[in-house]
Structure formats: structure tokens, C-alpha cells
Amino acid sequence: MIHNKKILALIPARGGSKGIPRKNIRVVQDKPLIAWTIDEARKSKYIDRVVLSSEDEEIIKVAAEWGCDIPFVRPLHLAEDDTPGIDPVLHAMDQLPEYDFVVLLQPTSPLRSVEDIDGAIEYCFSKKALCCVSVCESSETPYWMYKVIDGNLQPLISNNEIKYVRRQDLPPIYILNGAIYIADCNWLKESKSFLADESIAYVMDSTRSLDIDNEIDFVLLEHYLSLRS
């Protein structure tokens, strides 16, 4: 709880991952991928309850073994390939209406720390924001990106007055890293998206912003974890 507001942490993990089958429970350094998120969420001094949203029996069993609450089973129609990501969040809030804020923590961000989680919550409340999402600085910049039309290069961003030649002269660019999404529950039920005009950005270090999407990402994760140990 923070500022007398009850905080629900939701970890979404469906069983039908296509890119990397069963990735949410794939073992990395003796821990299932989802356990890295469960462990950090349970350390939070603000989160009142950490719950799982899943339709998959094996994921449910693994999450329970690592201390995550499972107060409901996600309906199958909310675990399809084309299910909008916000729908399981709205479902969870309907099942647990007593919370004021929801914190969405995807298991594909295993390097996110409790300091990141609590830092984002503190920042959200310090700004009196209705929604806060985590971002990190991008290693790529749209100022050096192009479209190819009929074989010809065309700048993605047209700027005839300023030409950025040196990387150090480029303005910083930030991207969503998928690690933390925070929102007022009533606001989210109305907006049905974490990304709106009211959303503010919480900047995370890029070294903790790895998003597991393919096999190379698992190799990078193993490498990062080995450096930390």
C-alpha cells in the first residue's frame, strides 16, 4: 500500500507462446523464467498482493510453487494468440475489485528489479499520475532511419535544417521496455490502455530492460545473470 491505496501486481502468463514454446516456465539458472518476476514483485514494500493470470495448468502450478497467488483461472477466450493484452488485465480487475492501482509485470522482463518496481510506483505517486509505464533509452534512433521507396532512401524523419552527423549530438530517444505498467484501476477500465495522454514515463536502465522474445534473448539473459553472480 502507498498513500492509502491498495496495489495489485498482476503477472500475465498464457501457455500458448508461439515464438518460444513454454517460455514462461523455461528454466534459467535453476529458476523458471516467471519466477524471476515473482521473486522481485514479492519483495516490494508497496504491492499488497501478487497474482497470476493464466489458463495453463503447468504455469499455474509453477507460479504457486514460487509463492504467487492464483485466485482465478484465466478464461480460454482471453488466452488466444489475438487476444488484446489489456483484456486479461481488465478481467483480473473485475475478479479483484478491491484494489486501487494495478501493476502489470510481464514475466518476459526477468532483469527488472524490486528497486525498479518500487521506484516506478513512487514516481507515479509523486507525480500524482493516473498511469506510468517504464521505458529505456534506445540504442537506435529514428533520426538515422530511412524508408525504402522504389529502391530510393527517404528519411523517416524529415528535417531540412538540422543534420545529425555525430551520435553524441543526437537527442535521446526512449522506447517502451515492457517491464512495468502502472495504472489507477478506475482510469484503466475507462481508457482500456496503459498508453494515453495521461501516461508518464519511468526511465529504467537499459541493462535491466531485456525483453525475452527469441532464443538469442535467452542467451543474453544467461550472460547477464552470469555477470551478476
Image (cartoon, rainbow, N blue to C red):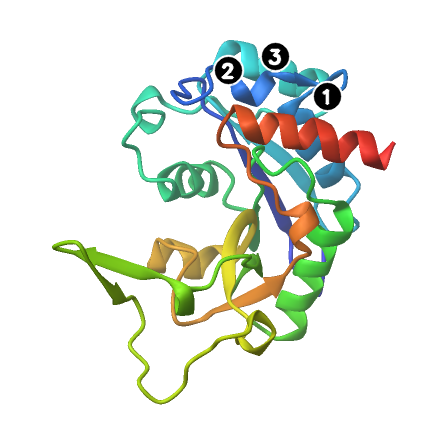
Left or right placement of residue 84 versus residue 106 in this view: left
Q: Nearer the viewer, residue 179 or 66?
A: 179
Q: Residue 122: give x, y in percent of width and height.
A: 71, 64
Q: Quadrant of the N terminus?
A: bottom right
Disc 2 residue crowd, few under 14, some 14–19, many 20+, Cα 10 Å:
some
Disc 3 residue crowd, few under 14, some 14–19, many 20+, Cα 10 Å:
few
Give the distance between the C-alpha atoms of the residues marked 2 and 3, in whole angstroms: 13 Å
**Nearer to us: label 2 or label 3:** 2
Picture disc at residue 22: 2
Give the distance between the C-alpha atoms of the residues marked 3 and 1, in whole angstroms: 9 Å
Picture disc at residue 2: none
Give the distance between the C-alpha atoms of the residues marked 1 and 2, in whole angstroms: 17 Å
Disc 1 residue crowd, few under 14, some 14–19, many 20+, Cα 10 Å:
some
Q: Amino acid at mark 1?
A: Trp
Q: Say if 28 sits above or below 101 in the image.
A: above
Residue displayed at 47% across by 20% down: 20
Cβ atoms at labels 3 and 1 below 8 Å apart: no
Label 1, secondary structure: give it: loop
Q: Is residue 4 visible?
A: no
Residue displayed at 31% across by 26% down: 81
**Mark 3 / mark 1, whichever is N-terminal:** 3
Q: Which residue is mark 3?
A: 61
Q: Amino acid at mark 3?
A: Lys
Residue 223 found in image quarter: top right
Q: Nearer the viewer, residue 19 or 102?
A: 19
**Mark 2 / mark 3, whichever is N-terminal:** 2
Label 3, secondary structure: give it: helix
Q: Residue 87: give x, y in percent of width and height.
A: 35, 40
Outermost residue toward the left? Answer: 150
Q: Which residue is mark 1?
A: 66
Q: Amino acid at mark 2?
A: Arg
